[in-house]
Image (cartoon, rainbow, N blue to C red):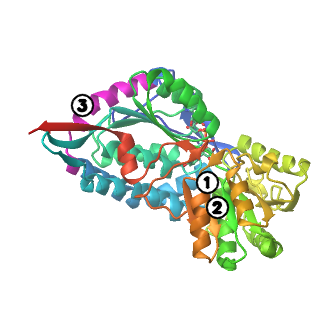
């Protein structure tokens, strides 16, 4: 089968990497290469920087109305090519096509639409300083931004960065994940067709070690927005420190899913199946530590196991598939190693733990894994503390509200948490105590782009969403006019 070769996108042109090197990218469901990605290096980032800094001089002065018009157009073109994007995202990432269609691609379009509207309707501060004068605040675009994204929600998360970045008048150099570059490549044509001026968005494909690091260490790129793992986040902090860059870091999680005995049982169970296994558990917001109040523990565990066994694992392009393939062989091996560790730590595999034997033929070498539930571990076990980022959850019985708050917060992560209870007072009380950037009560993954989003502790630095995105992608200054 012919491999799709993609190229960098600089100054609205597709260009080959300067050193001419490419590497294979794999179809996770088949375990075979299906494309070639430029192995970009520092000279490619330098070229992109030249284009982006030239474009900044005019784009930063373009009216908000014009920027907004182009962003709306980009959203419309993503919608118009939705099927194409959906198929590509599912094939490249391994995710079920139904998820790409209902979540990833509509959200990518919405990211542009949201910030197209947001910049037109935001108001700055103004205050009279009695007897002295009048102050007002003004936002300035910052310059060329480095946008580095992961592989789990490829276009969704990349556009979550591009849209506010360019809406605010900055220009961008993007480095999508080496594992999932296809939809970012397709987006380049959309940007061009929407009339985005040359150099405003540039894509440099390749690895984090080469292209990503060159962006982080580029002395003239003043801001980096990064979504990815906590270990990489720490490297980015260290490598960018000499340049005093503005950083937004959306990092890993080990999110709690707290189920009280007074919950709406069916709703808690159905949503917990989704929050455990959606996108093969490869969503930073998945609830991988399930804590169930003891009176309903057995019933909930049985229901969860029964539900997990019914989930269909297999061909990502089949409309009824629930779990596709994990993104890469390395990641599959990492997730499997945590299942082995769970057994060594004394856990019981309630279901899953294997590659489904039924997957043969073209799927025989795919990176599939059954939804896996592990019981019998204590909160101090590594499997209950470290991010696995796959279809593997632990389940644990708790006795009191105080206990579950303590074990939830006894984590180096603090990204999100779900609480299931029909007692409104308890919901507010527990939500108020939880150390996480987002707490959902009786729901999961309900995202409102107007609200702050980010992580506490090792789950991230800074907040994005609504005004917070504008805060990150602009410099805010105060101007004082004397009487
Ligand atoms: P990684 O941290 O491995 O990679 C993320 C991006 O950073 C990739 O583009 C990667 O390149 C690049 N990168 C790697 N090393 C460097 C470096 N030294 N300098 C600059 N860039 C670098 O994360 P994953 O892609 O494995 O994504 C999974 C992680 O992302 C999980 O921990 C998950 O929790 C987190 N995540 C967090 C979210 C949030 O909102 N908080 C949302 C989604 C995911 P390469 O292409 O080589 O991998």
Distance from mark 1 CB to nearest ligand 1 atom below 8 Å: yes
Inspect the magenta stretch and tell me whether residue 168 lies in it. no
Residue at (22% x, 34% y) in the render: 58
**Residue 321 rendering spot, x and y as whole percentages:** 66, 66
Q: Nearer the viewer, residue 300 or 368?
A: 300
Q: Check whether the beta carbons of the residues at disc 2 and disc 1 lie within 8 A of each other.
A: yes
Q: CA distance from mark 2 to mark 1?
A: 7 Å
Q: Is residue 444 visible?
A: no
> Which structural element holds mark 1?
loop
Q: Check whether the beta carbons of the residues at disc 1 and disc 3 lie within 8 A of each other.
A: no
Q: Nearer the viewer, residue 202 or 217?
A: 217
Q: Which residue is mark 2?
A: 278
User: Which label was assigned to residue 283?
Assistant: 1
39 over 293 or under it: above or below: above
Q: Is residue 71 visible?
A: yes
Give the crowd class for mark 2: few <14, some 14-19, many >=20 residues within 10 Å: many
């Amino acid at each position: 089968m012919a491999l799709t070769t993609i190229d960098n996108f600089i100054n609205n042109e597709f260009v080959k990497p300067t050193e001419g090197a490419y590497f294979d990218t794999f179809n996770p469901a088949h375990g075979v290469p299906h494309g070639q990605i430029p192995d970009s290096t520092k000279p490619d980032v330098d070229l992109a920087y030249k284009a982006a800094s030239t474009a900044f001089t005019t784009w930063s002065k373009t009216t908000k109305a014009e920027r907004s018009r182009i962003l709306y157009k980009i959203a419309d073109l993503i919608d118009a090519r939705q099927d194409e994007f959906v198929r590509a995202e599912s094939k490249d990432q391994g995710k079920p096509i139904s998820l790409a269609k209902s979540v990833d691609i509509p959200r990518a379009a919405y990211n542009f639409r949201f910030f197209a509207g947001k910049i037109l309707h935001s108001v700055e501060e103004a205050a009279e300083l009695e007897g002295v004068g009048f102050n007002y605040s003004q936002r300035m675009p910052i310059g060329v931004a480095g946008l580095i994204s992961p592989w789990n929600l490829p276009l969704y998360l990349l556009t979550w960065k591009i849209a506010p970045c360019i809406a605010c008048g900055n220009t961008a150099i993007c480095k999508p994940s080496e594992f999932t570059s296809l939809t970012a490549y397709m987006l380049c044509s959309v940007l061009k067709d929407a009339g985005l001026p040359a150099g405003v968005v540039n894509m440099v494909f390749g690895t984090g070690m080469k292209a990503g690091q060159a962006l982080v260490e580029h002395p003239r790129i003043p801001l980096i927005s990064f979504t990815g793992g906590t270990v990489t986040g720490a490297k980015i902090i260290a490598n960018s420190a000499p340049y005093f860059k503005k950083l937004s870091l959306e990092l890993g999680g080990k999110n709690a899913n707290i189920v009280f005995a007074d919950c709406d049982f069916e709703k808690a169970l159905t949503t917990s199946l989704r929050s455990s296994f959606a996108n093969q558990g490869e969503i930073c917001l998945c609830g991988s530590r399930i804590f169930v109040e003891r009176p309903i523990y057995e019933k909930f565990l049985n229901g969860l196991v029964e539900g997990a066994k019914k989930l269909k694992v297999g061909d990502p392009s089949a409309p009824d598939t629930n779990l596709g393939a994990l993104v890469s062989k390395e990641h599959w091996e990492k997730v499997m190693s945590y299942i082995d560790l769970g057994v060594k730590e004394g856990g019981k595999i309630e279901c899953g733990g294997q590659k489904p034997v039924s997957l043969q033929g073209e799927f025989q070498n795919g990176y599939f894994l059954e939804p896996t539930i592990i019981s019998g571990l204590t909160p101090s076990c590594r499997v209950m503390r470290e991010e696995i980022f796959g279809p593997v959850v632990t389940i644990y019985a708790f006795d009191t509200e105080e206990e579950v708050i303590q074990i939830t917060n006894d984590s180096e992560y603090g990204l999100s948490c779900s609480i299931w209870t029909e007692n409104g007072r308890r919901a507010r009380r527990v939500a108020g105590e939880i150390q996480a950037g987002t707490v959902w009560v009786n729901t999961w993954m309900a995202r409102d782009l107007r609200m702050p989003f980010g992580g506490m502790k090792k789950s991230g630095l800074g907040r994005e969403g609504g005004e917070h995105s504008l805060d990150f992608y602009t410099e805010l200054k105060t101007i004082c006019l004397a009487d």
